[in-house]
Amino acid sequence: MTIAIASDHGGFELKEDLKAFLETMGITCSDLGTFNGEESVDYPDFGIELSRKVSDGEFEKGILICGTGIGMSIVANKFPKVRAALVWDTFTARMAKEHNDANVLVIGGRTTARELAREIAKTWLEARFEGGRHQRRLDKIREIEKMWGMG
């Protein structure tokens, strides 16, 4: 499996750690930047690139990391077919996938310890969408996208 991953400077160190961890799980990461944690960058630039690629179907899944995760989650959810979830523990990571079929995981680089971020990513990647009543709810979200010409 190949997933897209991107961060701003506030998430750079965690992104690098997660890439190495995911590779031990046999997952290839397509790194969309930033490639330097020292220089301040604008998180929308990296969130836009990853979200566009998920929205267009180039990648099935993506992981975004910024200082808190808030900015990246706002950016990502502007794109049709992107269901980005800002999570802070393994429970929210599992629910993001099982109930919301989140295809973009968002983590705060300055608010989440490395070991926890690894557990979050693993949990999210291993969880499966439950469908059923949850599909009905996702269908309602798709209707919103269509209403705004996004779907």
Image (tube, grey):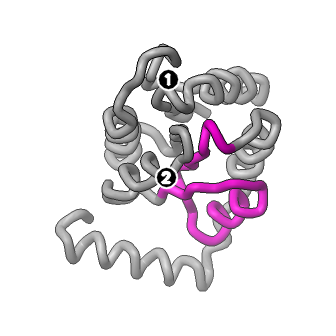
Q: Position of residue 76 (x, y in %)?
A: 39, 51
- Please determine whether, in this image, residue 133 is positioned above or below residue 49: below
Q: In this view, does 115 lie above or below 139?
A: above
Q: Residue furthest left?
A: 149
Q: Distance between the residues labelled 1 and 2?
A: 20 Å
For the C terminus, the quadrant is bottom left
Q: Residue shown at 49%/26% (left/top)?
A: 9
Quadrant of res 21: top right
Q: Is mark 1 on a helix, strand or loop?
A: strand
- Residue 106: x, y in percent? 56, 48
Question: At x 73% / y 27%, what residue is drawn?
Answer: 26
Boundaries of the magenta span: 84-111
The location of residue 142, given as percent across then percent down, is 36, 73
Q: Mark 2 points at which residue?
A: 70
Query: Disc number at residue 31?
Result: 1
- On whether residue 100 falls in the magenta region, the answer is yes
Q: Which residue shows up at 57% across the image and 63% down it?
A: 101
